[in-house]
Amino acid sequence: MPYGYTGSMKTQPGKRQAVIDILLSGVGRLREVGCHAYIVCEGDEDEIVVFEVWESKQHHDDSLQLPEVRAQIGRAMPMLTGEFSGRELAVLGGLGT
């Protein structure tokens, strides 16, 4: 069964677009490592929400160890406030799964 994850993060004031640009900069490679859907959205002021669907939880976890993903995380972290939320989801079907 595919693995779903949704998470949100708060950025420092005025840094949301820079973080969005980082999050979207490597999406082309995600499909190669088991990602079915990766959607970045603006939430409330300075908030970013990401919806993800992966082949499995292991595929998701492995993706977080890729050097390019680790570099993106390193670039984004100084622009975040440390306010994060996340939720794992059971994916049942739909468009993009």
Image: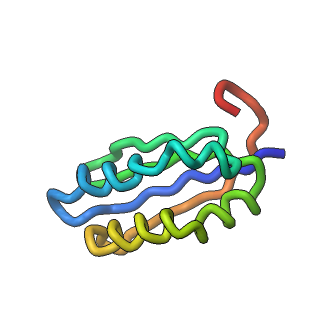
- Camera-side residue of 7 and 79: 79
Q: From the top left corner, tell me how far across and down residue 73 is, in percent.
A: 42, 68
Q: Residue at x 26, y 68 (%)?
A: 79
Which quarter of the rendering shows the N terminus?
top right
| Residue positioned 74% across, 42% down in the render | 91
Which residue is at a point 49% across and 70% down the rendered structure image?
A: 70
Q: Is residue 55 above or below residue 65?
A: above
Residue 2 x %, y %: 77, 45
* Closer to us: 92 or 73: 73
Outermost residue, right direction?
1
User: Measured along the vertical axis of the image, is residue 16 above or below residue 92?
Assistant: below
Quarter of the figure with residue 51: top right
Residue at x 31%, y 57% (from the top left corner)? 19
Most extreme residue toward the left, as rendered?
Answer: 14
- Specify whether 26 is left or right of 37: left
Location of residue 96 by image quarter = top right
User: Toward the viewer: 67 or 47?
Assistant: 67
